[in-house]
Every structure is written in C-alpha cells, then in structure tokens.
Image (tube, rainbow, N blue to C red):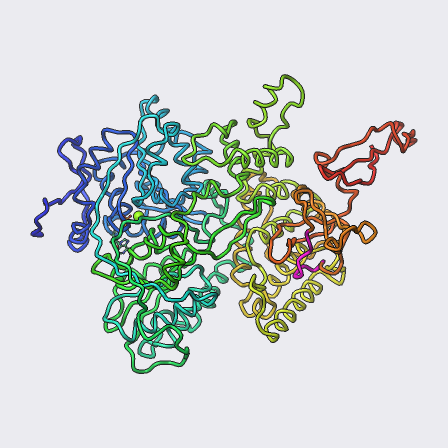
Amino acid sequence: VPSNDKPQKIFSGTPISQPAIFIPVDRSPEIQEARLKLPILAEEQVIMEAIKENPVVVLCGETGSGKTTQVPQFLYEAGYGSENDIIGVTEPRRVAAVTMSQRVALEMNLPQSIVSYQIRYEGNVSNETKIKFMTDGVLLKEIQKDFLLTKYKVIIIDEAHERSVYTDILIGLLSRIVPLREKKGHPLKLIIMSATLRIEDFTENKRLFPVPPTVIKVDARQFPVTVHFNKRTPLDDYAGECYRKVCKIHRMLPPGGVLVFLTGQAEVHSLCRRLRKMFPYCGRNVYNNSKDDDSQEAMKIFKKTKPKQNLILPKIDLASYSAMPLDEGDEDREAANDEDGSESDHDLDLGDGEAEEDEKEESSLPLFVLPLYSLLAPEKQAKVFCPPPFGTRLCVVATNVAETSLTIPGIKYVVDCGKVKKRYYDKVTGVSSFRVDWTSQASANQRAGRAGRTEPGHCYRLYSSAVFADFEQFSLPEMTRRPVEDLVLQMKDLNIEKVVNFPFPSPPSTDALIAAEELLISLGALQEPPKTGRLEEIQNAKLSSPITALGRTMASFPVAPRYAKMLALGRQHECLPYVITIVAAMTVREVFEETERPAVSDEEKDLLKAKKARVLQMQKIWAGQGSALLLGDLMVMLGAVGACEYAGLFPKFCERNGLRFKAMMEIRRLRGQLTTTVNSLCPEVHLYLDPKMKPPTDSQVIYLRQIVMSGLGDHIARRIRPEELLDEKWRNAYKTALLDDPVFIHPNSVLFRQLPDFVVYQEIIETTKLYMKGVSSIEPEWIPSLLPQYCHFGNPLEEPAPFYCQESGKVKCHRPSTFYRVGWQLPAVLV
Ligand code: ADP
Ligand code: MG
C-alpha cells in the first residue's frame, strides 16, 4: 500500500456523487506511483463532477500536468467507455495520437485493441476499442459519415490551443452536435483540453457556445528556468549554432538532459549525426543496427511496399482519410506563457564565435542523442521516454513536437533556435509553402518551460533579447491566415451550405470565404448561383451554393480542390495512374533537391546543375526522346517518379539524381492512398497501383496537359511577346489573370528558356522577382472548350459568319472569346 499524503486512490474515478459505475483498472504499482505525482490527479473529483453536470467542459493546464494521459482514464473508470460507448480523443498530430494511445494502454494495463489509435494511414481500432486516439482529420471524416457521432459518449479535443483548422472546425461542429444529441436522449460530452492560453476564443464566443462552458484550471509545478539570450543573433547557421551550444553545455555543465528545438526533420538528423560523431557512445551503436539511420528506415519502408506486395493494396477505410496532409510540417502554434523564468543577457561561456571542429572528442562523457519529430517511427519516438544508458547524458533533438504535445522527462537544458517551420499561404495564388521563420513569444516561452519540469533549469536562446522583443506575441490561428477552399468544400460536403454562418472559434475573413466559394464554383464543385432575380436573392445565394455531384467526388480525395478536380477528370484515356502520380508529386513538397537557398559555392552550383541534367536525362530514358522540355515541369516530375520506380526506388539512386528520397517515398504512399480512394469511389475501375508505370503515349501526354489545365484554370499565364513590349521590365515576362505585375518562369523550370505563349503554373513564389513554379505549356484553343467558365464569348452571329455543316446537317459557327478579367483574345471555337 503506497503511503502517500494524498487520498489513496486505488480506483481513481470514483467521486462520491458519481453514479456507482466503477470499472476497475489493474495498474502496476510503479505506474500508480507515477500517476499520483501528476497535478491532475488531485483534481479528478472536480473534473469528473464538472463533466457529469455540464455538456461542455474546458480543461486547461500546463503541459505535462497529465491531461492527455489521465483524463481518458478517469472517464473509462467512471463508466464512459462501457457497452457500446467509445471515448474519443483527437490530436492535431499523428505522433501524439500514436504515442498517447500506447502510453495510456500501458498505464491501464490494457491491450491496444481496447486503447487504440487511428491516423491517416493506419490504426489498430477493434470491436473492443473503448478509448480511441485519432487525428482531428479522422474524426472530421467520421462526422461526414455519421453526423451525430453516435458511437461516442465523450469526445475530447486535445491540444485545442494549437488552433489547427481541423480542431477549430471540430469544435464548431461539436457545438451543434452536443445539443442535438441531448435532444435525442443520448447525450454526448465534449471536453476541450488546452494549455493555459487564450481560451476566450472558446469560452466567450456566444455564437459558438451560447451557454459558456465550465472552465477548470489545473495547476502544475514549474521550477524556475533561467533564460540566456545570445548577444548576437546568427544570421543563417542556427543549426551550427545549436551544435556549438550543445557541445559547450555537455562539456561544461552539470548532468541533466538537453532538449534542442530545430525546425525540421532534415535538420534534426543532421545535428544528431554531428553530435554522435563528436561524442560517441562507447564506440557501440546503440541507436540502430545500421550506421545510417535514414537508409535503414528507408529500406524497411521499401521492403514493406515493394511492388509485388503492392499489387493488392491493403483496403484502407475511407474514414481513415484526413482531407489534407495534416502534419507533414510541424507548424507553429500557441502555447503557455506562464513560466516565471528570469532573464539574463549572458552567454553561457567564452563568447560565441568559437571555431568549430567536427573531430571526435575522446575525453567527454558520452552523449546519448535521440531525434524526435512527427514522422519518426513510433518505436523510435518512444525512446525519448526511457532513461538514457547509465553514465550518459540525454540529448533530444526535436522539432516543435516537443513543445506541447510530448513531455520528455529529465530535461534540464533547452537550446532554442527561435525558428519554426511555418506554412505560408499566398493570398493571391492561394498555394502554400513552408518557410522557416521566427517563432512567437508564447512558443519560445513554452519551449523554455520544458527545462523546468523536474528541477530548476536553463534555456539558451540563440538570438538576442532585442530579436525576442520583436517576435509576435502569439501566432494567429491557422484558420485566419490560409485560404479556405478545401475547408469550404469539406463543409459543403457535410451539407453546411452557409459557411459564413458557421460558428468558427476564429472565423476566416469574408474575403477568404468569397474567394473559396468562387474558386469552387469555377471548378464545378458548387452550383452556379442564379445570375438573375432580386438583388437580395443574388446576394444571399452568393455564399450559400450547394455542392454538386462532382464536388462530392472531389471532397473524397485527400488533396486540395484544384488537384481533386484533376483526379475527377483523370478517368479518361487511361490517364488515371498518371494523374494520380502528378497530383501526388504536386502535393508532396520539394521533390527535387534544389533548395530555396541559393547554392553558395561554384562547386555546389555545378553539382546541382549536373544533377538536374541527370533528372532530364532520366526522364528521357523513361519516356523516350519525345521532348520532355516542351511539356513542362509536371511531366518532368512524372518522369522522375517513373524512372525512380523503374530503378527500384533506392536512396542512392535518388541522391545521384538530385531527388529527395523521402519525397519519393511519400509520393508512393500517396499514390497508394489515392488509388484506394478511386477504387472505393467507383469499384468498377479496378485500379491497382503498379509503382512501375509505362511511360504515357504522346496523345496521353496531351490529355494530361489538358487535365492539369482544367484544375488550374485561374493559374493561366500568357507571355508578353516582344512586339507587345512597352516596358523593359516585361521582357520575357508573363501576365497572369490574378496579378498586375510581370511574373517569370522560375530558372529551375525546364521551360525557362522555351518561353511558350501560354502556360499554367502550380504556384508563384516571390524572391527577387515573382516566379512561377511547376509550369506546363498549354494551347490557347483548349481554354474556351475546356474552361468556358473563365471565358466571355462574343456574339455567335458576328464574324466569322455561321455556315452550314454538311456532315452534321446543322448550322455551325465559330465563337470567339476573351479570357477572364484580363480580356485576352482566344482562338474561336467551333460550336
Ligand atoms: P499533458 O497532456 O497535460 O501535457 P501528459 O498526460 O501528456 O500531460 O503527460 C503527463 C506525464 O506523463 C508527463 O510527465 C510525461 O512525462 C508522462 N508521459 C507521457 N507519455 C509518456 C510515455 N510514453 N512514457 C513515459 N512517460 C510519459
Ligand atoms: Mg497533452
């Protein structure tokens, strides 16, 4: 019997006034002891009373207080997961859904068939599942199938402070589902869990919850953290700066784990490698059996998905789809701000300009280095929770996954690069990109707080206090800073026609909603609103167009609407496997190794050039000599995937040809997923994924370009020809339908020197100029016949005159047209 001052709880979850349902849980004594140390255990009774008395409860508490691991257990013990009822928990990240389900199963001594998870590609949910962790996208798809979520008795929305768009939409939807379930006599409890930040968006939003939800705060112990700023802010090489800082900490400071925050997977791996080389662990490789972590992992995935086994795809349930790739980048978010760290402007040591040496160091203690990021295999993630081998210091190199989702024990030092990989959305083109930028003050404070969980700690910020003062206070909710066409489509698919009236916790701007609705109408996903009638009716109809059958098909694909349109059109002339590949390649970022950062040395430039030439060469070998150049970047991507799969998809092959192996793997995975979606939408297609495609025929290539154009109708650009040139700045430039300024074909494009008259582009990025990326050439006569919605047609009875057609026995005429607002003359089409 543990002797603890706190009331002893053998079966926690048994507050006095609860109905007498106690589901006993058989926990090990160690687990029970660890649980009793968590601040949330002291609040169990208060929490369970509040849940019993109220339909909606907001629970906030500092990261590590035990919300995610304990609340589902309280509910289970109180009988919320009995009979046919499931306790559902949503997480914005796949990592958290997987690790938390494993942790809770372990704590409760239950198998994973009872405490399960479901994420985009996989899961272990069974008929017996009582506690189900899932990504928010998965629950959204379930709402599309069963709006009332009848199999759930409780839904926990975890990490609500992250304000991911799916979390926000779920909260909006659940605010309506809860009263409906009440009416049905089968109440649903909603618990919103958040770090202690800005919960007013949920609690003081009358449109969302007319009756304000009950708020419970859980206090957590937090030890003081001393914050050290750098005197200078390194301009570019923050990863190198991290390396130097960790080396110093390890050599000079007393024992205690180190947690480093970087921005992405590649950076994490590269720092891990450098640190392991510098401070090897007894010469043995304890991390992996192979020297190269990455290639080992890659081989495992490769073995799992080798073509032979892939002929019959595993049936993935549609419910497991989330509508968009949810967490391929660890995005920014808000976090608690309440650690009381003192600040000092002192650097750790002898100045920060020390020359760096990468040679192995013999004298220091070994450093036990572990990576942590979203897409890391779950068993590798779990390693950070185990104590490091005796006589070593733990060093976890993480993306901002470690900021709030996961709490790593034993961290005393935090090294914060101050950067975050953020998804930016171009307001004009609407296409997103990832960029590394400064994080917010709230996030930086949350990161610092990770150092004070078990004892006083230190946080080393690799930037100056002046730079910190310029950080934004919080990051804006994702909903308000991205285009929303994909969400509008998903919501219309849920028959929410007037999206403007939807109770968003932080609504997107009306402009963003109008832009989304207009795009979806022009893609044919929504019905065209009436053009005649009373002004009021037209206005009213404007933002409430119902979804079309095509729109429903498009909504089933887990890609953005423009790409979904291409997939919907792809079932012609046996183009579908190619369209799927092109869409997969467009969705996965950075297929080619070329980085945003310009090549520094001439050597590097030459290397990139040579690799680029090889990609083209490879594409030609795969697709024959038929000039890949004329067809554009998307065909090159198709060729790269095709050639890569023929070669067997090896890391070495990719490296040699300037392709990112990870991107190629992701493309293959997405191809499998899209193939499954197509098969479940129309089983008669019987599509199967053969990673090794035959190259498309010449006529198929033309169809493919037409299909791509049909999805990118608002991304057409026309070359300003030399004879039209009025201003030098338009030399070799293109005019787009959306921008007034000249745009150019990106130097990395295969069409850079070709300059076709008409092109479509995937996105525009702004560097020194506005550049189009992902460019394909198109023929202007395709536009009026394939994209009539973007054209203004002239009077058919005007020139050229109508004529009688012998063959059809009908009067035919040529209809000239102009394109969109820009009024480009298009070739006349025969009707
Ligand atoms: P919160 O959700 O409030 O941030 P959690 O429930 O995630 O808190 O974590 C509570 C405690 O459980 C933390 O101290 C954390 O270190 C511990 N913990 C969580 N997951 C694991 C795990 N997989 N292994 C060991 N300890 C864990
Ligand atoms: Mg949590």
Q: Nearer the viewer, residue 407 or 770?
A: 770
Residue 514 falls in image quadrant? top right
Whether residue 275 sits left or right of residue 557 in the image: it is: left
Q: Position of residue 247 (x, y in %)?
A: 34, 73
Q: Position of residue 290 (x, y in %)?
A: 41, 72
Whether residue 814 sits left or right of residue 418 in the image: it is: right
Helix, strand or loop for the magenta stretch, by majority: loop
Query: If the image is split into quadrants, where does the C terminus sit?
Result: top right
Q: Residue at x 65, y 61 (%)?
A: 748
Whether residue 779 sits left or right of residue 415 in the image: it is: right
Identify the residue at the far bottom of this view: 362
Q: Is residue 515 above or below residue 298?
A: above
Q: Position of residue 814 (x, y in %)?
A: 85, 34
Which contiguous range is marked in magenta?
743-751
Question: Is residue 571 visible to us here?
Answer: no
Question: Is residue 775 visible to us here?
Answer: yes
Q: Residue at x 16, y 50 (%)?
A: 36
Q: Nearer the viewer, residue 813 or 690?
A: 813
Residue 408 falls in image quadrant? bottom left
Q: Is residue 102 above or below residue 483?
A: below
Q: Residue at x 86, y 31 (%)?
A: 813
